[in-house]
Image (tube, coloured by chain):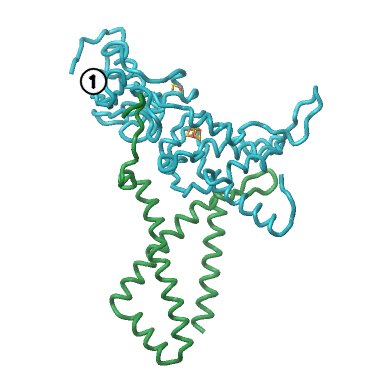
Chain colours: A cyan, B green
Amino acid sequence: MNPSPMPVSAVGANALRTITLEVFRFRPEQDPLPSWQTYQVPCREEWVVLDALNYIKDHLDGSLSYRWSCHMAVCGSCGMMINGKPILSCKAFVRDFPDHIRVEPLGNLTVIRDLVVKQERLLANLSAVKSWLIPKTPAAADEPYRQTPVQLDQYRHLSMCINCLLCYAACPQVALNEGYLGPAALALAHRYNLDSRDGGTFERMQATASADGIWECSFVGECSEVCPKHVDPAGAIQQMKLASSLDWFARRLGLGERS
Amino acid sequence: MSSSVYTPKLPRWWWLHHAGYRRYMVRELSCIPIGVFAVMLIVGCWRLEQGPESWQAFRAALATPLALVWQLIALAFAVYHSITWFALAPRTMPLRIGARRLPASWIAGAHYLAWAVLSLLVLRIVGG
Ligand code: SF4
Ligand code: FES
């Protein structure tokens, strides 16, 4: 424990509350196994957990590694387990937590160092589900793809995803099956399926309706609880199950290809 | 560990760790009492087909305290499953009329209405 004198410039003079931050450390070049390290951090009323980590990095221990960028819940890089729950650390106000806060890397994902996890799984799965527009009909070179506000409204909430991986950390199926495409990738596949300009649903189904796709989901529903952008990946996946089942029946009944 | 990364393991009793996971597990486990109750119903049909005596014996067996407690447990699980299922329905099938989304309460409400109508229908048929 090293309660070093705190520079007034860094924390200001008013309303300090000393928080014990118990931080997950993993530095493979020193120790092949992770360990816990405890810091005493004088926190201001309006601080979020990310501010407390920045205080540690600046004043107590420069060796601590974690990701962040925007400090305003937009970039999606600062997700962590705080007292066991996946949350954006720039959105987690210290005042909402007890005096002892435990900070871990996002669950269910491979840890590279301290609080930094591998993001490759999401990136690979986004490619696997083709989370991009596959135009129904190629537009003329100088023509935009037009869309009405009502058509936009079909998928707008799904397009709010910031790829923060909180939903992967909340999902037990992500941990149980390494190949599972996961909530965000499936929600983004659905985002394009619902887009009036898109004609790629059938192509995407090769991945989304595979053994590693939507049917791996057992509707635990925690992904939607933790999502900071109200994407509701669990709802999107259930909608895809419904659409995929209808598609299966339509094919059996010889009602032809659906795009 | 040979690699230079750390891969966490899901704890064996992972679903005990969070309230959300526990609620999910109760939902999943509700299939057991509901399934057993369905088997009891099938046995009932089979006993009915065998004639009045065996039907009466089946009914008497259902009225024993142990069987009653079991039926109450099955009912509790069925109610829990139905309510949580209906609560999720608006997210599984969002509906819209023209440009407007139908409010979630309408979709859930329609499920409750269908439940009530079907229950009344069954009661009428069974109750004579
Ligand atoms: S769906 Fe939500 S929780 Fe998952 S990555 Fe996107 S924004 Fe994050
Ligand atoms: S730092 Fe960008 S989301 Fe938290």
Query: Is disc 1 surrounded by few (<14), some (14 to 19) or many (20+) residues within 10 Å?
Result: some
Note whether A67 is above or below A98 in the view shown: above
Q: Which residue is drawn at 26% across and 8% down?
A: A7
Tell me if A35 is positioned left or right of B85 in this view.
left
Q: Residue furthest front?
A: B2
x%, y% of residue A87? 40, 31
Q: Which amino acid does label 1 sit on?
A: Tyr
Image location (x, y in percent) of residue A9:
31, 7
The residue sitting at 43% across, 37% down in the picture is A226
Q: Could you tell me which residue is drawn at 26 percent across and 22 percent down?
A: A31
Front residue of this view, candidates A29 and A118: A29
Task: Write down the quadrant of residue A108 in the picture.
Answer: top left
Mark 1, ligand 2, within 8 Å: the answer is no
| Res A11 quadrant in image | top left
Element at label 1: strand
Whether residue A252 sits left or right of residue B91 in the image: it is right
Q: Nearer the viewer, residue A74 or A213?
A: A213
State which quarter of the image contains the N terminus of chain B: top left
Look at mark 1 in the image and give the residue it sits on: A39
Label 1: chain?
Answer: A
Which residue is drawn at the image coordinates 46% and 27% (left, top)?
A119
Q: Where is residue B36 in the image (x, y as percent from the top left)?
A: 40, 69
Above or below, A170 relative to B112: above
Position in image of residue B49 (x %, y %): 48, 87
Give the number of marks. Answer: 1
